[in-house]
Image (cartoon, rainbow, N blue to C red):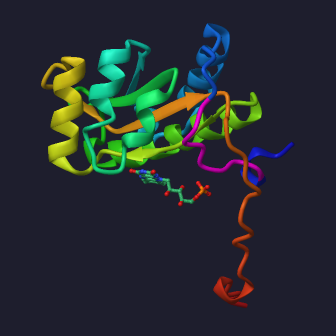
Amino acid sequence: MNSIFHRVSIRKYKVRPVEREKIMQVLKAGMQAPSAGNQQPWEFYVVTDRDKIRELSKTSPYAGCAELAPVVIVPVYRKEGIIFPIYAQIDMAIAQENIWLEADALGLGGVWLGIAPLNERMDAVGKILDLPTDKAAYSLFPMGYPAESRIQQDRFDESRIHFCN
Ligand SMILES: Cc1cc2nc3c(=O)[nH]c(=O)nc-3n(C[C@H](O)[C@H](O)[C@H](O)COP(=O)(O)O)c2cc1C
């Protein structure tokens, strides 16, 4: 199965915990991402505390689906001590996509909930996780065994390809 052509946003989850080995495998995929100057700005907070998850689900108007997830992964980046801070959010996007694809490959589902670059949301997540000032929340990724299924939309559009010979 090629997860690029299978992954969809999953916002409903079974009431079933995700095994620690699967969480670690998903995060391994995240950390395998390329980054500018190989700076690897990431750290990952793994939240299973129900109160904290509820609070996280309120940090954006579009994060409500996180509330009932068994686990929420919060990718966070270091703002200091990295080589190219301007690329940190781009690096994080690649790591987040790797996480999403690996989750799919393991039979899990999740959805990327946008936090960065919106300062208000980043601060709200940072407060809940008690992040130090040199770390910034990038996204929320509620994850679990899917309680919904969908066929991925075909987005191939040949008119967007321009060969320059
Ligand atoms: C940067 C980014 C931010 C997103 N933020 C949200 C969000 O806040 N809430 C949400 O429900 N979905 C969010 N999504 C999921 C998109 O809505 C979803 O990926 C898109 O509709 C395509 O559907 P698919 O993932 O099933 O292919 C986000 C996706 C990306 C890439």
Determine which quarter of the picture holds residue 123.
Answer: top left
Where residue 102 appears, as percent x and y from the top left, is 68, 33
Q: Position of residue 31 (x, y in %)?
A: 54, 27
Residue farthest along the top direction in this orientation:
20
- Point out the residue furthest to the right here: 1
**Residue at coordinates 59% horizontally, 48% vertically from top-left?**
9
Residue 156 in magenta stretch: no
Residue 80 place in picture, x, y as percent:
20, 29
Residue 132 occupies quadrant: top left
Which segment did they paint magenta?
6-13
Task: Locate residue 24, reporting x and y percent.
Answer: 60, 15
Look at the picture and state if 131 lies above or below 122.
above
Magenta: main secondary structure: loop
Given residues 69 and 95, the one toward you in this image is 69
Q: Relative to residue 71, is residue 59 drawn left or right?
A: left
Q: Is residue 69 shown left or right of residue 1?
A: left
Q: In front here: 44 or 19?
A: 19
| Residue 36 seen in the current view | no
Quarter that holds the C terminus: bottom right
The answer to whether 143 is drawn above or below residue 64 in the figure is above
Q: Where the N terminus falls, by quadrant?
A: top right
Q: Residue 11: within the magenta?
A: yes
Determine whether, in the image, residue 56 is placed left or right of residue 40: left
* Count of labels in the image: 0
Q: Is residue 126 above or below residue 22?
A: below
Residue in the picture at 65% in, 11% down: 19
Q: Residue at x 65, y 50 (%)?
A: 8
Res. 54 visible in picture: yes
